Image: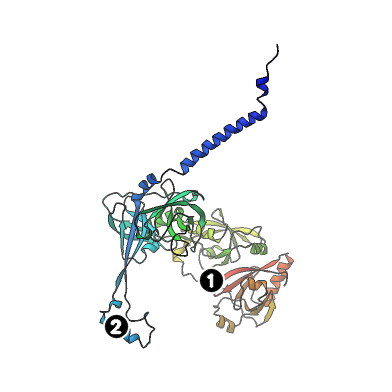
Amino acid sequence: MQLQTSTLTRWTPQRAFNALGFVVLAMALMLAQAVSSQTRPDSLAPLADQVSPAVVNITTSTVVEGRTGPQGIVPEGSPFEDFFREFQDRNGGEGRRPRRSSALGSGFVISEDGYVVTNNHVIESADEITIEFFDGDELQATVVGTDPNTDIALLKVETDEPLPFVNFGDSDTARVGDWVIAMGNPLGQGFSLSVGIVSARNRALSGSYDDYIQTDAAINRGNSGGPLFNMDGEVVGVNTAILSPNGGSIGIGFSMASNVVTRVVDQLREYGETRRGWLGVRIQDVTDEIAEAMGLEQASGALITDVPEGPAKEAGLLAGDVIMTFDGKDVEDTRGLVRQVGNTDIGKSVRVVVFRDGGTETVLVTLGRREEAERTVPAAMEQMEDAPAEREILGLTLSTLTEEMRAELGIPEGQDGLVVVDVDETSEAYEKGLRAGDLITEAGQQKVETLAALDERIEEATEAGRKSLLLLVRRGGDPRFVAISLEDS
């Protein structure tokens, strides 16, 4: 009997692979459609209905003092000064009357007992703050506390009824491309919603504690202080600023990340002020050239440029140390360290690992409070007398510091080093910002007060195979490290 194989021979391995591929493709398309339907709902109306009752409009009123005379209209001493003063007097002195100035902003309720979050710049200097709710009710608010560093303010309204409120979400989980909605009172037009995506994360504008979410959701004047929601109705940011050449939205808006805001709000709620940790050092980023000059494997960490009186000095940290880890976490750069320290409890003893003299050391530091240390004066340094001398080296004309130079340049007592008299404009030193009047206090992480000491540092660096020398330069009292190539010295 002959076996019928015609039907079997038509089902080849290639045909089986094609059929399997078709099934996989169909399943992938079905999954993509399901995911798309989850991430892009047909309408945002249900979400808007859910969160709108907790979003508020804020109107502030401030008394602005009138001018006491014609100053600002004509120059002082002008022959027209008496004329404008008489004109104001004839009109009842209207130019001198105090007047009220109003401003608009947004906010959102975070608790049923009436705590409201907004921007500090929305309510700054206001003597009256009115909160308008979604249903049109209005209540007067008082300021619980403010934090200009993050531009966050916490307000409180008194009410007998529990208020609708929204919760904060985890801003660290927000990804570039996630859908978000912004709500507020743009241009005083009343409650408004705009939609967009997270365009970027971890943006910094100007503050030490900045951590902004960038979004293309429309944000305009009046949106300040309003919430940025994720698709779960959680607040992941507080709308704060826009980048715009004309004052209107061009799709580049910034919202302070909720993980920064929640910590600030908790402190304002408990203490009425912020309480940030303070290490007590001046720092700068580690560049590739600085890393090479110091013998570091990679350009990371925070380089200490100065150690004033405070926790760091008491613990033994030194200028020239590179902070590699803080409280068990790696330090990427100065911005990261500032945030880590600020978010650490006051009085906590933390382990700080530093790179020093070619190796690592661990220092235990008990943190102070930053707000109490704003006026800390840098520590004084030892002073030595030395005979005047001048020489050109590394593209710099250098001189030992004389008392005449100290007085002329305003260099405080206790700071000593080599004065930059002139800089060759074709040199690397000029390109890196060194200028006449700068004071070089260290070279190769050791003090230099004479030209002979500088020669020794150059020789040591050359013998160690270093291609550059690390200089500590002070200008107006502010220190920074600069790495200068030794190849042409």
Q: Position of residue 238 (x, y in %)?
A: 42, 56
Which of the pair 88/403 is nearer the observer? 88
Residue named by callout 1: 379
Left or right of 22: which side holds 66?
left
Judge whether 441 appears above or below 209 on screen: below
Q: Quadrant of residue 289?
A: bottom right
Which of the pair 283/321 is nearer the observer? 283
> Does any portion of residue 447 appear in the rendered image?
no
Q: Badge 2, how many Cα within 10 Å: few under 14, some, many 20+?
A: some
Q: CA–CA distance between discs 2 and 1?
A: 57 Å
Q: Position of residue 362 (x, y in %)?
A: 59, 57
> Does any portion of residue 157 appear in the rendered image?
yes
Q: Position of residue 161 (x, y in %)?
A: 27, 49
Q: Quadrant of the N terminus?
A: top right
Which of the pair 476/311 is nearer the observer? 476
Q: Badge 1, how many Cα within 10 Å: few under 14, some, many 20+?
A: some
Q: For the point 51% across and 63% down, which residue is it?
A: 311
Q: For the point 55% across and 34% down, which residue is it?
A: 26
Q: For the point 49% across and 38% down, which residue is it?
A: 34
Residue named by callout 2: 87
Residue furthest to the top in view is 1
Give the residue type at disc 2: Phe
Residue furthest to the bottom in view is 79
- Tags 2 and 1 in contact by the CB under 8 Å rule? no
- The answer to which of marks 2 and 1 sits earlier in the sequence is 2
Give the residue type at disc 1: Ala
SS of the residue under disc 2: helix
Q: Position of residue 357 (x, y in %)?
A: 65, 63
